[in-house]
Image (cartoon, rainbow, N blue to C red):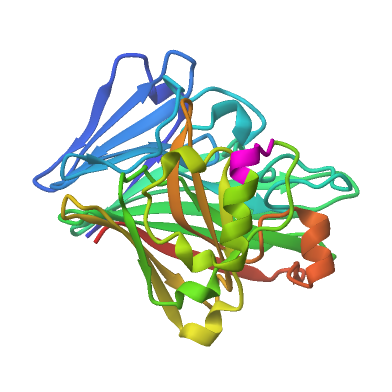
Amino acid sequence: MKTRLPLCREQFTYTPCLLLESEDFSVELFRYPAGIEAIRIHNRRGTVIVLPFLGQMVWDVNFDGRALTMGHRFKQPLPGDSIIDTYGCFAFHSGLLANGCPAAEDTHALHGEMACARMDTAWIVLEGDRLSVEGETEYIKGFGHHYRAAPAVRLGASQARLVLEMSVTNLAGAPMPLQYMCHINSAWVAQGQFRQTIPDEAFQLRRSLPAHVRPTPQWTAFTASLASDPAALRRLDQPEMYDPEIVFFADRLAQYGENVQFELHSPDGYALMTRFSTAQFPHATRWILHNADQQVAAYVLPATCRPEGFAAATRAGTLIALMPGEQRHFQVETGLL
């Protein structure tokens, strides 16, 4: 049996309200003090908070008593037009017309327009032992692009993992550019060790310097050593070296198989994991940052291109042209191993 529960903004109040309760799930609707609508989902393994009307961000994830979300200073999600206005979530959708850090010649916001998009509709689907939060938003500009984005978050009753999905349909009469990254801001794992089904040598240090990166002499020396031996950073054992951020790229992932898996193993005996299709995501980014304000070990960010902005993707030939009426679907599984 499949049950569909439409959601409207008026249902979300500052006092949490129980929407659904079963043997497998409980679902609460609430509104943060800043006004952002949220869904708190409990399954048998933990809790997930989804922001159904703000780009369908996954704000927070906790499974088996372990926080999977990056460390940050935001007390709550905040309204904004750019992800930089509310950078504390577990995962967001980066893109779709442009993705990544804009270069000097770019005009788009950091990580594009979808990250904080105002969703038109949202609903919950309960089917057997699976629960989904789904939604749609239609982007349209006069004399510009026109598309429909339909993200989804899916959760099993007894699983400590999420499935994050995105479908994009070009509704315009002309091709549209498409760049997409599933931006998973994973928790910092002290002494965590990276493992993956691709060679260590597949990762290469980022050479470009975005405007927000301010190199220090220590960082410059450290990254110089990583440039000649990227595989040297296999373990998170020098947090003082990861400020500013350390970024690696891995390209042409299809050469390593139809599906790839990335893991971050803790010395405490658990591991984080992310799995995806290389046909959908031919590129991967690893983003590491540790300072007083943010602590993140994004061991993999699956993407259609490097997150270096629209102009860089155009030059690299990794910008997708979505034809009129064409749809692309993306899916990522992430959580505890």
Q: Left or right? Give the position of 62 relative to 87.
A: left
**Does residue 175 appear anywhere in the picture?**
no
Q: Left or right? Give the position of 241 relative to 141.
A: left
Q: Left or right? Give the position of 285 relative to 261.
A: right
Residue 28 placement (x, y as % from top left): 27, 30
Based on the displayed image, in which of its 4 quarters is residue 324 positioned? bottom right
Residue 41 placement (x, y as % from top left): 26, 39
Judge by depth and name the residue closer to the eye, 199 or 229. Answer: 229
**Does residue 148 appear anywhere in the picture?**
yes
Q: Residue at x 65, y 58 (%)?
A: 206
Q: Left or right? Give the position of 111 relative to 311.
A: left
Residue 107 placement (x, y as % from top left): 84, 43
Judge by depth and name the residue closer to the eye, 230 or 162. Answer: 230
Q: Residue at x 56, y 49 (%)?
A: 246
Instruction: Quadrant for the C terminus, please.
Output: bottom left
Reply above or below: 263 against 51. Answer: below
Residue 93 placement (x, y as % from top left): 55, 49
Instruction: Quadrant for the N terminus, please.
Output: bottom left
216 in the magenta segment: yes
Based on the displayed image, in which of its 4 quarters is residue 259 positioned? bottom left
Judge by depth and name the residue closer to the eye, 211 or 178. Answer: 211
Q: Residue at x 73, y 44 (%)?
A: 210
Count of numbered marks = 0
Where does the magenta region start and end?
213-219
Judge by depth and name the residue closer to the eye, 227 or 46. Answer: 227
Q: Residue at x 91, y 49 (%)?
A: 143
Reply above or below: 43 against 306. Answer: above
124 in the magenta segment: no
